[in-house]
C-alpha cells in the first residue's frame, strides 16, 4: 500500500511539474483511479486541480461533473 501511494504521489508531482504528455488527461485518470479506490478526499483534490489548472479543457468539464455528483451523493 505504501509503495502504491508513493508511486501515485510521484505521478502526481510529475504531472504538476510538466514531465508528461497530456497532463490534464493523466491528472483526470489519476483522480478517477483514486475515486475507484474510495480515496474520495484525494479524488476531490485531484478533480479540483484539473478544473483549476486546465479550466477550458474537456477534462475540466468531466471533473466538474464528477465533483458535482460527489457533492450531492449521500
Image (cartoon, rainbow, N blue to C red):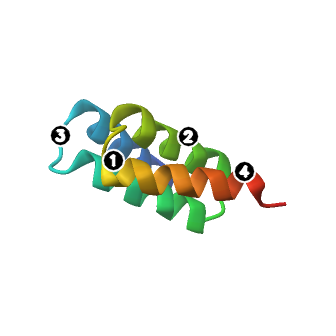
Decide if residue 14 is on the left or right side of residue 29: left
Q: Do the residues labelled 3 and 4 touch (CB within 8 Å)?
A: no
- For disc 3, the marked residue is 19
Helix, strand or loop for disc 1: helix
- For disc 4, the marked residue is 71
Q: Mark 4 to mark 2: distance in Å?
A: 13 Å
Q: Mark 2 to mark 1: distance in Å?
A: 15 Å
Residue 2 placed where, x, y %?
Answer: 53, 52
Residue 55 placed where, x, y %?
Answer: 37, 37
Question: Which label's residue is closer to the chain start, 2 or 1?
Answer: 1
Question: Which label's residue is closer to the chain start, 1 or 3?
Answer: 1
Identified at 25% across, 31% down, the residue is 17
Q: Mark 3 to mark 4: distance in Å?
A: 31 Å
Helix, strand or loop for disc 3: loop
Identified at 49% across, 62% down, the residue is 32
- For disc 2, the marked residue is 45
Residue 39 placed where, x, y %?
Answer: 64, 55
Question: Which label's residue is closer to the chain start, 3 or 4?
Answer: 3
Question: Which label's residue is closer to the chain start, 3 or 2?
Answer: 3
Decide if residue 73 is on the left or right side of residue 38: right
Q: Mark 1 to mark 3: distance in Å?
A: 9 Å
Identified at 30% across, 55% down, the residue is 25
Question: Which label's residue is closer to the chain start, 4 or 2?
Answer: 2
**What is the quadrant of the N terminus in the image?**
bottom right
Amino acid at each position: 500500500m505504501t509503495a502504491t501511494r508513493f508511486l501515485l504521489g510521484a505521478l502526481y508531482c510529475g504531472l504538476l511539474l510538466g514531465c508528461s504528455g497530456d497532463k490534464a488527461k493523466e491528472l483526470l485518470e489519476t483522480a478517477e483511479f483514486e475515486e475507484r479506490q474510495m480515496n474520495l478526499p484525494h479524488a476531490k483534490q485531484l478533480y479540483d486541480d484539473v478544473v483549476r489548472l486546465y479550466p477550458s479543457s474537456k477534462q475540466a468539464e468531466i471533473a466538474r461533473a464528477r465533483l458535482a455528483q460527489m457533492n450531492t451523493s449521500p
